[in-house]
Image: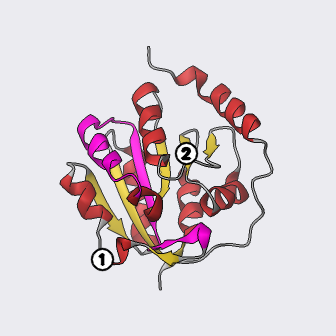
Amino acid sequence: MLLRRIDAIRILMEYIRDEIVVCNIGFPSRELYHIKDRPENFYMLGSMGLCSSIGLGLALSLNKKVIAIEGDGSLLMNLGALSTIGYTQPNNFMLYIIDNSAYGSTGNQKTHTVNTSLCGIARACGIDAVEVSQEENLRRIIEEALNDNKTKVIVVKVEPYNEKVENVPLHPMYIKFRFMESIKRHRKS
């Protein structure tokens, strides 16, 4: 049986200490907020398709591990990001793709990952990528990726499911300024 997206996020956050986390719009951000709110989390409340690009930009400019929690539907809108990630290969970036083969925040309409491998595309872009669907393997892979000094893509296959959680109650400007304050000390010189 496949995990749910909220389980994949919960498992990841069990291993997160002071790393920077950028989270995709809609239910993923809502679920992350519900699991573990902290200043180092950037909740995207718009800009579908840009989570991986924002995460990459942060990784290139910070001396801190950056994790982008991306959805399959969102990444499909900006597949060119994988090519850029493969070209730049920052040693502090992990792209954590939660692939439910659906646009989860708009009603679970099917995405093309029912017959397209995001892991295969990432590998074709020269990125160390792995696809996983079982919790035990996921835990091992997360732990390894957080300790490695290289770019890593983890595609977590999950079932289409939205946890019934409230919207992020923080004002977008508060999210922005709180996040900016939390990353100030990690800028590359």
**Res. 159 in view:** no
| x and y percentages locating residue 34 in the rendered image | 72, 59
At x 42%, y 72%, the residue is 111
Label 2 packing within 10 angstroms: few (<14), some (14-19), many (20+): many
Mark number, residue 115: 1
At x 61%, y 49%, the residue is 46
Q: Verify whether residue 89 appears in magenta.
A: yes
Could you tell me how far apart the alpha carbons at marks 2 and 1 are, in whole angstroms?
27 Å
Local SS, label 2? strand
| x and y percentages locating residue 107 in the rendered image | 60, 75
Label 1 packing within 10 angstroms: few (<14), some (14-19), many (20+): few
| x and y percentages locating residue 31 in the rendered image | 66, 61
Q: Verify whether residue 31 appears in magenta.
A: no
Image vertical order of residue 39 relative to residue 187, above or below: below
Q: Nearer the viewer, mark 2 or mark 1?
A: 1
Extreme top residue here? 189
Amino acid residing under circle 1:
Asn
Extreme bottom residue here? 1
Local SS, label 1? loop
| x and y percentages locating residue 130 in the rendered image | 30, 62
Horizontal side of 14 relative to 118 (left or right) equals right
- Picture quarter with the C terminus: top left
At x 42%, y 47%, the residue is 146
**Residue that badge 2 annotates:** 22
57, 105: nearer the viewer: 105
**Res. 5 in view:** yes
Image vertical order of residue 86 relative to residue 48, above or below: above
Amino acid residing under circle 2:
Val
Total numbered labels: 2
Q: Give the range drawn in magenta.
A: 77-106
